[in-house]
Image (tube, rainbow, N blue to C red):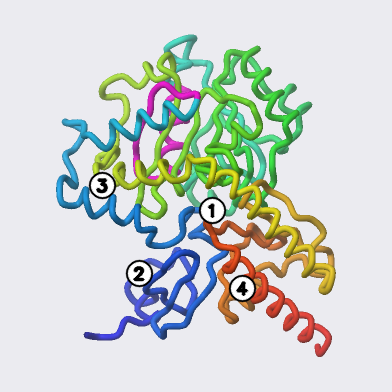
């Protein structure tokens, strides 16, 4: 068999990504092995996707069992895994009804369309304005990148959908001034992931809820990255004790198998009547069977309480490293979505830190040039945390030595 190489990516794939030189071939727990059988500790979690690590036996079994039954039916029919999963999501949250799709971007696309359609049905066509926030990320469709509002994702793709405004994150006063009778929705990530791992303040979320109620606008929480146990509750809105009207979830919902969902109330859901929206693979039996096993595992006190203790272990380790090699000025985020904010000396060098760690066998993420991001498995072992922190310290020591030698 011909050996697959990284060069084949440049030859055969569209260059919208720039993947690492190594090619992972298998994983178990929070360890990954590449083609040369080199082992890496995974603190990245597939960008907060692999919430149960790699090849979790119960998730693998769920996929294998369903694969012997039904793969696809189309939405001319429903199926048992989709119905069971929808019930479990509703039982565990504020939601009364669920829409299934394939990704976080699709879930947000559905949420934004629903918000406008609901306001059209309940009020009038002028009530269509969407408020989002600086540094937000909501997906890669034209609508969702427009709501996200980061120019690096929208440049060259115009004309963009209109009726969208962007405000400073966590600014209650700015939101109070901007929201009005024509606002149909306010869209918030309770913890901004791509934007720097910044948590919303409880005051900001409470104010958003209050202002949406005053102006008959819907409050949408994008929990694609911060949901599914990542903060220590099943969803972050439960951590912050502010209930949205619509919630979007994906990533860890399938722990690597593509699935997304939009959760909402029965009253709001009525605006997505037959024919108004759809997804060929939405509610796919394979995806829903996997996600059903995932929620059964994550939505337990053992896992959710473990997130809190694992966060403390990681933060304590990061602080210890920083006491030896001062590199960051703040640890932020919630649960096991951790942002390591670089100090003035190291600003702009997050990618350099990631690359040095990768060369030593540790997988990390960045959240912009000034933040190193950690999104490990929610059930990462103490041994894997210790090994990863040791590799991190080794890498930082090398960067310090290189800086001194320069």
Which residue corresponds to mark 4? 387
Which range is magenta?
Answer: 94-116
* Residue at 84% from the left image edge and 64% from the top image edge: 344
Closer to the chain start, of discs 2 and 1, is: 2
Q: Which residue is rendered at x = 75% and y = 55% of the image? A: 331
How many residues crowd around disc 1 within 10 Å: few (fewer than 14), some, or many (20 or more)?
Answer: many
- Tag 4's secondary structure? helix
Q: Quadrant of residue 281?
A: top left
Q: Residues within 10 Å of mark 4 (few under 14, many from 20)?
A: some
Q: Are marks 2 and 4 in contact (CB under 8 Å)?
A: no
Tell me which label, 1 or 4, sits earlier in the chain: 1
Residue occupying the point 67% across, 24% down: 208
Near mark 2 (Cα within 10 A), the count class, few <14, some 14-19 or many ≥20, is: few
Rendering coords of residue 191 (x, y %)? 63, 42
Pointer 3 or 2: first along the chain: 2
Q: Which residue is mark 1?
A: 378
């Amino acid at each position: 068999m011909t050996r697959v190489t990284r060069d084949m990516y440049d030859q055969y794939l569209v260059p919208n990504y720039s993947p690492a030189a190594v090619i992972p071939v298998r994983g178990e727990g929070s360890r990954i092995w590449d083609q040369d059988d080199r082992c890496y500790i995974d603190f990245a979690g597939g960008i907060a996707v692999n919430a149960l690590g790699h090849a979790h036996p119960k998730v693998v079994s769920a996929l294998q069992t369903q694969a012997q039954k039904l793969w696809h039916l189309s939405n001319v029919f429903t199926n048992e895994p989709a119905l069971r999963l929808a019930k479990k999501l509703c039982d565990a949250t504020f939601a009364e009804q669920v829409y299934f799709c394939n990704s976080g971007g699709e879930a947000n696309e559905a949420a934004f369309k629903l918000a406008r359609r609901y306001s059209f049905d309940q009020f009038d066509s002028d009530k269509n304005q969407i408020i989002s926030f600086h540094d937000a990320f909501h997906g890669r469709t034209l609508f969702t990148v427009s709501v996200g509002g980061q120019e690096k994702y929208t440049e060259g793709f115009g004309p963009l959908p209109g009726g969208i405004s962007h405000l400073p994150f966590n600014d209650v006063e700015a939101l109070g001034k901007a929201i009005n009778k024509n606002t149909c929705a306010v869209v918030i990530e309770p913890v901004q992931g791509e934007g720097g791992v910044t948590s919303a303040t409880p005051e900001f979320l409470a104010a958003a809820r209050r202002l949406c109620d005053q102006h008959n606008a819907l409050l949408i929480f994008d929990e694609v990255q911060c949901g599914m146990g990542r903060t220590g509750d099943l969803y972050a809105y439960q951590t912050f004790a502010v209930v949205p009207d619509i919630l979007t979830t994906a990533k860890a919902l399938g722990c690597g198998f593509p699935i997304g969902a939009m959760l909402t109330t029965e009253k709001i859901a009525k605006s997505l009547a037959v024919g108004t929206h759809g997804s060929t693979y939405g509610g796919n039996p394979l995806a829903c069977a996997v996600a059903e096993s995932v929620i059964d595992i994550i939505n337990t006190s053992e896992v959710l309480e473990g997130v809190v203790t694992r966060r403390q272990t990681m933060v304590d380790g990061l602080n210890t490293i920083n006491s030896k090699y001062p590199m960051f000025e703040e640890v932020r985020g919630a649960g096991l979505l951790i942002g390591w904010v670089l100090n003035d000396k190291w600003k702009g060098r997050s990618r350099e830190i990631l690359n040095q760690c990768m060369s030593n066998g540790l997988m990390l993420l960045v959240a912009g040039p000034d933040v190193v991001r950690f999104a490990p498995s929610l059930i990462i072992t103490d041994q894997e945390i210790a090994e990863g922190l040791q590799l991190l310290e080794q890498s930082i020591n090398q960067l310090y030595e290189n800086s001194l030698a320069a």
